Image: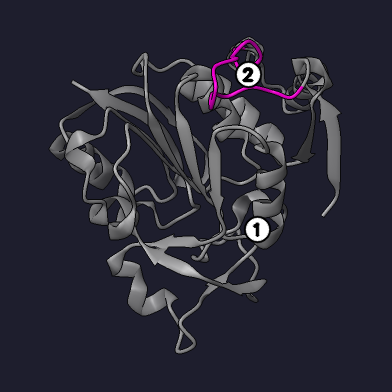
Amino acid sequence: MRVERTQIEGWVSILDTHLRSMQTCWPSTPVLSALRRLQPAKRRGGNKFRGKMDTRILKLPRTSLWNLAEMDRDYAQAKLPVSARVVLDVGAHAGIFALWALGTWSDSKVVCFEPHPELAQICRDNLAELNADVREVAVIGAADVPVCVGDDGLVSLYEGKRTLLGTSVHRLGWQKESAAARVKWMRASDLPPCDVFKCDAEGPELAILADYKYGSTVSALLCETHRRAEWPQLMELAWHWGLEMTRCNPGRNGCVTSAWRRA
């Protein structure tokens, strides 16, 4: 996989160039605005960068541009809580959402779950010295255990055909047929309590959320479903948790990104 390294001040031009190639226009200001809020945080144990914001070098896989666009297009536009202490990031990829979350909620700790070995290491590097914990493990709901967990106690991980962004324990049509790795996993029911739950694992979201024990206390849910039939199920689950939708963006291939907060 080709990894690009870029500075924060280059994100705007890189993102704009990429989006113009798709004849799409999304603002990039909210992403940088949230990230820049990390810079002045000087409290002990808080989220801060080692030097100036524009001198921190991040590892950005090419597909991270989609993550940046998602922050602007969906999450930055949603009416989310003004504070959060614990944020869960299931499907953390390179840590782009985690960086955005740390900038948006300056007192938060983000717990990331990313099973792909290469992406997990990039995520660790990007979140170094910040208030984040990266766990290299797949999160599996009970409904997926019989079909995903093998006799060796591991799960197969399938990379996307075009990008690592599509890596999943499921094969939805845009994953490669052969497994890239056998990885460790944990039950969704063992996830800790949180204020904000972001779940985007390319397929197993509904099974994960259905097993989460603390949905009734979550302040906000950020989720991307990847099958059209799952959208009504997500709405029912979110309403059961006592949440109301503040943002919804239908995408390609039946994918829907949505944001929910406590009513």
| Mark 1 vs 2, N-terminal side | 2
Residue appearing at x 66%, y 45% in the figure: 123
Q: Is residue 208 left or right of residue 23?
A: left
Q: Reply above or below: 192 against 245.
A: below
Residue 235 visible in the picture? yes
Please report the bounds of the magenta region as a residue range. 37-50
Q: Quadrant of residue 208?
A: bottom left
Q: Position of residue 22 (x, y in %)?
A: 72, 28
Badge 2 element: helix
Query: Looking at this view, is 4 or 232 the one in front?
Result: 4
Badge 1 element: loop
The amino acid type found where label 2 is placed reads Leu
Q: Is residue 172 left or right of residue 35?
A: left
Residue 229 visible in the picture? no
Asked if the stretch drawn in magenta spans residue 34, the answer is no
- Distance from label 1 to label 2 (Cα)? 28 Å
Which image quarter is the C terminus in? top left
Query: Looking at this view, is 165 or 45 the one in front?
Result: 45
The mark closer to the camera, 1 or 2, is 2
Q: Which residue is mark 2?
A: 35
Q: Quadrant of residue 231?
A: top left
Q: Position of residue 23 (x, y in %)?
A: 72, 22
Q: Which residue is mark 1?
A: 160
Q: Reply above or below: 156 against 88.
A: below
Residue appearing at x 28%, y 58% in the figure: 189
Q: Position of residue 68 (x, y in %)?
A: 64, 28
Q: Is residue 154 left or right of residue 225?
A: right
Name the mark on residue 107: none
Q: Is residue 78 left or right of residue 183?
A: left
